[in-house]
Image (spheres, rainbow, N blue to C red):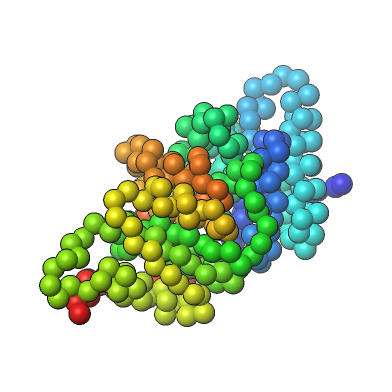
Amino acid sequence: MEHPTVEDEDIAASPEVVVGTDGTATASRAVAWAATEARVRRLPLRIVHAGPYATEDYAPGRRRAAAILARAYTIAHRREPGVEAHTVLSDEAPVAALVRASRDAELLVVGLLSGHPGDLLVGSIAPALTARAHCPVTVVHSDHNLSGNRRTVVVGVEDVAADTPALTVAFADAARHASPVSVVHAWRRACDIPGTAAPQTVLLHELGPWRARWPDVPVEVRIVHGGADEPLLAAAHGARLMVVGTAGHNLAARAALGSTSRTLVRLGACPVTVVRRDLDLTAAGAPPARDAGAVRS
């Protein structure tokens, strides 16, 4: 099948969904998932394959790369024939190419093998992409159940003010897919002081801007005490998507992915979207900031 290919330098000037592929079965699932997201968002799809092809002095590498892109395009077209899709072959390292392609993207999607074979990939690709990409990054496993639209979007919240980007991504996604949102919050504030409102009441108040911005999205709040890893992993079963925030783009932030975000990316039972806390998501409909002080009864 003929498919449009653009030069790596021709980075889009308008929003799109970007997906990376290396020709594996997991990457193919990521391409199919990304194609559906592109349709729902009414955006074009950019399929990127990257490798050190400029250093190769023989044609087989380029032919293999072209075959990988052609197959990915076919998968996307069969999944969502109405989506405008194009392919990009880059001579850069995969992380550098995908970070550059993310500059004008609404979403970057990559595939990831589940279990131990993916550990090395998580250690090299996922932390770098989630720390450096200019948009949210979704990681799709080889064993994720990708069917169904109305299942819950789960979002892990450590601090409402800090996790504003993650909340915005979760609510916007739920609105697009007609899904409810489940907010899982690890409560660390005192709640047994006389006159202090219950944790659920406080959190629902702090979620007011998102509930007002997306009034048709059903919201449930789950308060957990202690670590959030196990509750979030449990909530991922049956969920359509898991959304979690992470720190900025410096080295310390990459190390921070070694906790909750890394655990969810490695072991989550649904696709996981990691959102940098310093991303500006005004264009995605982020509600205006407001004081998220505690509510008292």
- The answer to which quarter of the image holds residue 7 is top right
| View extreme (top): residue | 57
Residues 289 and 246: in front is 246
Left/right placement of residue 4 relative to residue 152 reads right
Where residue 276 appears, x then y in whole percent? 41, 52
Left/right placement of residue 295 relative to residue 230 reads left
Residues 256 and 205: in front is 205
Image vertical order of residue 281 relative to residue 122, above or below? below
Residue at the image point whose x is 39% and y is 60% from the top:
184
Q: Quadrant of the C terminus?
A: bottom left
Question: Could one spot residue 104 in this view of the protein?
Answer: no
Residues 118 and 49: in front is 118
Where residue 56 appears, x then y in whole percent? 69, 21
Residue at the image point whose x is 51% and y is 42% from the top:
267
- The answer to which quarter of the image holds residue 191 is bottom left
Where residue 53 appears, x then y in whole percent? 67, 27
